[in-house]
Amino acid sequence: MLPPTSFPKNEIKILLLENVHPSADELFGAEGFQIDRVNGALKEDELVERVKDVHVIGIRSKTRITARVLDEARRLLSVGAFCIGTNQVDLVHANSRGVPVFNAPFSNTRSVAEMVIAETIILSRQLFDRSREVHDGTWKKLATNCHEIRGKTLGIIGYGHIGRQVGVLAEMVGMHVLFYDIAARLPMGNNRSMPGLHDLLAVSDFVTLHVPETPQTRLMIGAAELARMKPSACLLNASRGTVVDLEALAEAIKEKRLAGAAVDVYPEEPESNSDGFSSVLRGLPNVVLTPHIGGSTEEAQEAIGREVAGALVKFVNSGATTGAVNFPQLELPQARNTHRVLNIHRNVPGVIRDITGIISDRGANIHAQMLATDPAIGYLVMDLDQSLSHEVKKAVAALETSIKTRILY
């Protein structure tokens, strides 16, 4: 009788934090995994205590997966960020520990794009100012500085999944669309690429940001960039809070060098719903402030739950890392009547020679094999004879270069 594989599915433990949508439970539950839920985020000390025997952690934007958390999670196989951003996870340390991190780059695209188009109309008509005045009992009906968005130019900075969707919707309501991205991008519809950031800023009536948080994007919109924009233009940021210098933006609004702004993300955000949020933009005219809700729709959260949970299930079941943000990309169809051995190792010379030697010495047959690497690690997937797979797995795991080794059906 063959020995069992490394770990039964019904003992895989999933920890979901921050009200991850129940659609994730459906996928995990169908696999027989154990699911533990926490409604909100956990502080580092609390999380360290909860992760000691957890195999998969699911978070949103508030929980921080630090190096300490990763070191304490001895059984951790993977992390799922049920959102787009992954800056709340120490990706480099996760890589070094052999822990791939998956996110949801597609599922909230439409929700964010719709909000951007809505805010463009709101800013163009100064709707929030008029609404606030009526709530306060003031009737101020006017048309001055209020415009249709049809025929206006929308400049998109960052032409990824969300940026492209914004461009498509903007064209549907009659806007001209320009975009700037550091990478070559295929234009959608009649969207047109601009050669430089300043070129886009100078001619756009609305500028919307859709970039990740990187050293290159930090404070990429400051006083100098705002000065390039038309006094009648508006700035929208639903990307990352570190991208815009809010002090400079507030000054531009106060001095009427900019007509308005819509901001959904901030350099520092509360960890939970509460009073007491502070920003230099509060109370300024024609400024829309929202509490990081760009992707906060029922549709988006349900789709995110399915997208990330699906990626995590595939990794646990087959070792597929397609879509992981910090890991070599690999997905190998499984050969029949084999055991799959997964090995994560330090990317140094001689590793594959040593592993091949182990297989050869034991007379094992490789039915399928695939290797992918990045500068720090290598990820090897092998489908082997069932009769020898456990012996091979044990020997490979004992190599000094191995980080993590497990065996699957």
Image (cartoon, rainbow, N blue to C red):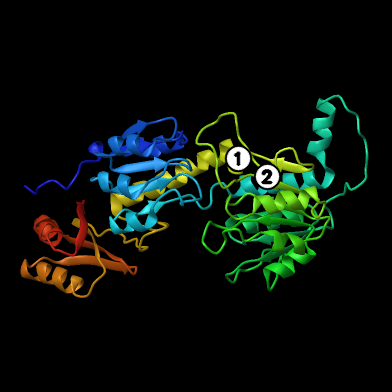
Kindly state the secondary structure of the residue where label 2 is placed. Answer: helix
User: Which is more toward the observer, 12 or 95?
Assistant: 95
* Residue on which the image places disc 1: 293
Q: Residue furthest top?
A: 137
Task: In the rendered view, tell whether residue 178 sits above or below residue 265.
Answer: below
Task: In the rendered view, tell whether residue 210 sits above or below residue 134.
Answer: below
Q: Is residue 276 left or right of residue 332?
A: right
The amino acid sitting under disc 1 is Ile
Q: Residue at x 49, y 44 (%)?
A: 304
Q: Tell me the crowding category of disc 2: few under 14, some 14 to 19, or many 20 or more residues within 10 angstroms, Cα based.
A: some
Dot 1 and dot 2 residues touching (CB under 8 Å): yes
* Residue on which the image places disc 2: 115
Q: CA distance from mark 1 to mark 2?
A: 9 Å
Q: Tell me the crowding category of disc 1: few under 14, some 14 to 19, or many 20 or more residues within 10 angstroms, Cα based.
A: few
Q: Position of residue 142 (x, y in %)?
A: 93, 39
Q: Position of residue 159 (x, y in %)?
A: 62, 62
Q: Is residue 161 left or right of residue 311?
A: right
